[in-house]
């Protein structure tokens, strides 16, 4: 646009355009003319009614746009008419345009108060959906709200979390980028930089934006810019091409054929309006004769610029057009009709206005359409008609929602080089906002990436964290910049880039990679383990030894050495020792309710029975030696009946303790998850700790009492004093069980059970070896000592 610095002393000149005609915009305006002529020749839409038009070049300038908007609002008559027909000869029913969002906003603010509807084919700013600010604005192109969402989903689809962003410093760029950044934030995408620029900025400003792109670490650049602005930025980048970047383009520039000439942008992806077919438009655009061109100042300017000749005036620098010029030979956006996108939006805008007028001036009767061209149509009627528009043209549906927006449908396009090295726009997918969530976005064709690569480029601030690790943000940086650390013990992450690790369920444990939970191995003292086999062998061996000893003693029951040591208590003691050895087997194997109750109670009762027998034998020894004193008849008070009663009484007390324990809070099987984090220990919980320690305490009390009596009787004069052997056995018994307490408490897992079994076996072997081994040896190997004389000999 040509601008003049005003000095406030003369009337300012009206704004006017300079530079070259934009062939693409020319195609849009010619498509509008084609649609109007098509409607005027139609016998179905507005028969008998002719649409007129005026086309103005706003030069993408807000001042020129506002100037044109006031002209359209006021009419072009040079005088004011009085009465009811004031200025009606030039009244405008609707406006098609503008192509840009910022000019459209300016125009809407001017013509909106006059209820003049405006239908834009290319203004996409989401801000224009605000019905309070722009009540008369409609558009056939979707809002940038949907475009931004489609672009964010596109970036997310390929796993790009670290991107750069550039935008036009205009309503289109600023609002579009703001909408995109909101959508990107929801998708977890981070932005390394966000730069704005405008084509009229000083070169240093555009150079600075280009330098930011060159120095960036992100490999993906999202550009929400107008084609004219983008051209300046790409020209700056072309002077010193940066390392290849993956460009993501908004609809405004990614479909512009002129920009596809920048080879370093090859592989760019973007969203585009759906391709369309408009029958007859290509011939209308290309069948231009010199006389038709000369009748239009705009076509004349384009023709002379394209063929470098003059149609009317003579110019020494240019030749005169001789009529041989053929527009079909040109390679220009005006002649490019293979991918009509925005052109169809302009075409549909005209038809939308025509259908709105149809609703106001036409009626259908007897399958015929009658239109009254004499009706004084108001722009407000056209405005009301546009709100109800709902039709299809050439297979493309047209309607507006309450905000004046159409249904959003985009194609996803990719810049791909053909075999001839020419960059072409290829459709690779679509985005349809009318579909349910999850089905709106689809890529159904292979893409070409930067440098012609077929591999998806990677753009992230940090490498992805594999499963088994979690992200830890780097201090002072974006949330997409992080370090990967392994999950702590007992926790896993089973997806890439997990922000947190989560603990496995209580009965599960992570694998080595910490990316999955597996059931913890269950541990208990099973019969298959070597330790269990060894303990079981000792247990059975001890029981066999007790049985063999009992058999030998029974076979020699009439000998002095057997008869002299209370054979009844000896056999009962050997029986109880056999049970003691065998009860240790109940501690091996998986705990169950019955085994837990059985192992502790059997152990407690059999050991009390055993200690009671030993205690009875000790008392008998003491009584026997006391009875040898003159006048002492104490032995008659502790004869066999009293001995049996003593054993039964002491054992019955333990039985009562065990019964109370089982009734109040019996032992039960539990899964111990606390001793080892990585495995489960199956063990028997005590139920009542008081009951358990009462059982042990009672055994210990009897053992201590027996030990004291045995110590008192150890020096009694006799060649075979059994009290000495009982003393040694009780000494071993007490030592074992005193040592057992700290070992039992400190032993982990299944070794707790092993310690208890060891204590049972050790104390049992101590008893059988100390009390019965010497007698066993004499009976079998020294029978000469198995005499009453030898036994009665004083030591």
Image (tube, rainbow, N blue to C red):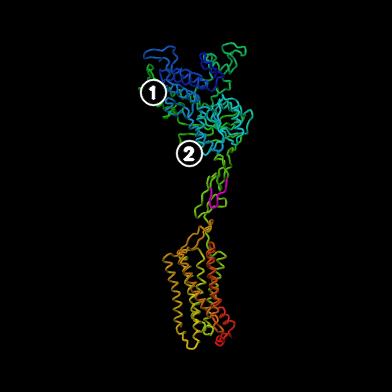
Give the position of the N terminus as an image quadrant.
top right
> In the rendered view, would you say 421 is above or below 464?
above
Q: Earlier in the sequence, mark 1 or mark 2?
A: 1
Q: Going 41% across and 19% down the picture, which residue do you hit? A: 47
- 381 relative to 682 in the view: left or right: left
Position in image of residue 524 (x %, y %): 52, 62
Task: Bin the neighbour count of mark 1 within 10 Å (Cα to Cα): few under 14, some 14-19, many 20 and up.
Answer: some
Q: Nearer the viewer, residue 182 or 441?
A: 182
Q: Secondary structure at mark 1?
A: helix
> In the rendered view, would you say 173 is above or below 289?
below
Could you tell me if residue 757 is visible in this image? yes
Position in image of residue 479 (x %, y %): 54, 40
Reading the image, the residue beneath label 1 is 359
Q: Secondary structure at mark 2?
A: loop
Task: Bin the neighbour count of mark 2 within 10 Å (Cα to Cα): few under 14, some 14-19, many 20 and up.
Answer: few
Q: Nearer the viewer, residue 391 or 754?
A: 754
> In the rendered view, would you say 788 is above or below 414?
below
Q: Are marks 1 and 2 in contact (CB under 8 Å)?
A: no
Q: Nearer the viewer, residue 268 or 502?
A: 502
Reading the image, the residue beneath label 2 is 438
492 is within the stretch colored magenta: yes
Q: Quadrant of residue 39?
A: top left
Q: Going 51% across and 51% down the picture, which residue do you hit? A: 503
Position in image of residue 176 (x %, y %): 50, 30
721 is within the stretch colored magenta: no
The residue most toward the right is 240
The residue most toward the top is 314
Position in image of residue 627 (x %, y %): 49, 86
Q: Which residues are magenta?
A: 484-493
> In the rendered view, would you say 537 is above or below 724?
above
Give the position of the C terminus as an image quadrant.
bottom right
């Amino acid at each position: 646009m040509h601008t003049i610095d005003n000095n406030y002393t003369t009337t300012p000149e009206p704004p006017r355009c300079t530079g070259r005609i934009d062939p693409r915009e020319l195609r849009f305006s010619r498509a509008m003319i084609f649609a109007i002529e098509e409607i005027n020749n139609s016998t179905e839409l507005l028969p008998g009614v002719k649409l007129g038009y005026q086309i103005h070049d706003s030069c993408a300038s807000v001042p020129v746009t506002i100037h044109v908007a006031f002209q359209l609002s006021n009419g072009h008559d040079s005088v004011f008419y009085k009465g009811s027909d004031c200025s009606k000869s030039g009244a405008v029913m609707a406006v098609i345009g503008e192509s840009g969002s910022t000019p459209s906003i300016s125009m809407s603010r001017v013509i909106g108060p006059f209820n003049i509807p405006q239908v834009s084919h290319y203004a996409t700013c989401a801000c224009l959906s605000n019905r309070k600010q722009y009540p008369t604005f409609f558009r056939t192109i979707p809002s940038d709200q949907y475009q931004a969402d489609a672009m964010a989903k596109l970036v997310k689809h390929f796993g790009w979390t670290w991107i750069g962003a550039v935008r036009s410093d205009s309503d289109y760029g600023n609002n579009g980028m703001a909408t995109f950044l909101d959508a990107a934030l929801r998708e977890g995408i981070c932005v390394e930089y966000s730069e704005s620029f405008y084509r009229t900025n000083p070169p240093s400003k555009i150079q600075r934006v280009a330098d930011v792109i060159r120095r960036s670490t992100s490999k993906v650049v999202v550009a929400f810019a107008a084609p004219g602005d983008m051209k300046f930025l790409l020209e700056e980048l072309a002077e010193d091409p940066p390392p290849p970047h993956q460009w993501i383009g908004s609809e405004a520039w990614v479909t512009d054929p002129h920009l596809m000439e920048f080879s370093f942008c090859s592989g760019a992806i973007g969203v585009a309006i759906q391709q369309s077919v408009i029958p007859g438009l290509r011939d209308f655009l290309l069948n231009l004769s010199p006389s038709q061109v000369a009748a239009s100042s705009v076509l004349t300017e384009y023709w002379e610029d394209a063929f470098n000749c003059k149609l009317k005036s003579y110019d020494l620098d240019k030749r005169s057009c001789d009529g041989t010029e053929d527009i079909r030979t040109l390679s220009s956006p005006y002649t490019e009709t293979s991918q009509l996108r925005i052109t169809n939006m302009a075409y549909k805008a005209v038809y939308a206005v025509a259908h709105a007028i149809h609703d106001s001036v036409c009626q259908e009767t007897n399958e015929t359409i009658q239109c009254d061209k004499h009706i004084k149509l108001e722009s407000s009627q056209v405005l009301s008609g546009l709100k109800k528009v709902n039709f299809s043209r050439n297979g493309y549906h047209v309607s507006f929602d309450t905000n004046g927006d159409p249904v959003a449908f985009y194609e996803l396009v990719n810049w791909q080089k053909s075999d001839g090295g020419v960059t072409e726009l290829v459709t690779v997918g679509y985005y349809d906002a009318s579909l349910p969530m999850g089905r709106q976005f689809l890529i159904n064709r292979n893409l070409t990436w930067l440098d012609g690569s077929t591999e998806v480029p990677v753009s992230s601030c940090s490498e992805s964290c594999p499963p088994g690790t979690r992200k830890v943000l780097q201090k002072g940086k974006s949330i997409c910049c992080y370090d990967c650390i392994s999950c702590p013990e007992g926790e896993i992450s089973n997806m890439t880039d997990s922000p947190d690790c989560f603990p496995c369920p209580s009965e599960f444990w992570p694998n080595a990679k910490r990316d999955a939970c597996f059931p913890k191995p269950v541990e208990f003292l099973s019969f298959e383990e070597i330790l269990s086999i060894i303990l079981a062998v000792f247990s059975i061996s001890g029981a066999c030894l007790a049985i063999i000893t009992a058999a030998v003693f029974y076979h020699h029951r009439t000998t002095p050495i057997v008869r002299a040591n209370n054979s009844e208590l000896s056999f009962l003691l050997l029986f109880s020792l056999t049970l003691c050895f065998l009860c240790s087997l109940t501690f091996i194997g998986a705990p169950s309710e019955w085994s837990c109750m059985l192992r502790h109670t059997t152990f407690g009762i059999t050991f009390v029975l055993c200690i009671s027998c030993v205690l009875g034998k000790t008392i008998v020894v003491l009584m026997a030696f006391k009875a040898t004193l003159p006048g002492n008849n104490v032995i008659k008070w502790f004869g066999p009946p009293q001995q049996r009663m003593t054993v039964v009484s002491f054992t019955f007390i333990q039985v009562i303790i065990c019964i109370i324990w089982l009734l109040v809070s019996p032992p039960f099987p539990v899964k111990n998850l606390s001793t080892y984090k990585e495995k489960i220990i199956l063990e028997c919980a005590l139920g009542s700790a008081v009951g358990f320690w009462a059982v042990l305490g009672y055994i210990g009390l009897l053992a201590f009492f027996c030990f004291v009596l045995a110590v008192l009787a150890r020096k009694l004069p006799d060649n075979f004093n059994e009290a000495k052997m009982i003393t040694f056995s009780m000494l071993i018994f007490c030592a074992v069980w005193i040592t057992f307490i700290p070992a039992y408490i400190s032993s982990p897992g299944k070794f707790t059970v092993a310690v208890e079994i060891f204590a049972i076996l050790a104390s049992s072997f101590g008893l059988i070896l100390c009390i019965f081994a010497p007698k066993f040896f004499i009976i079998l190997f020294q029978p000469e000592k198995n005499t009453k004389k030898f036994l009665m000999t004083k030591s």
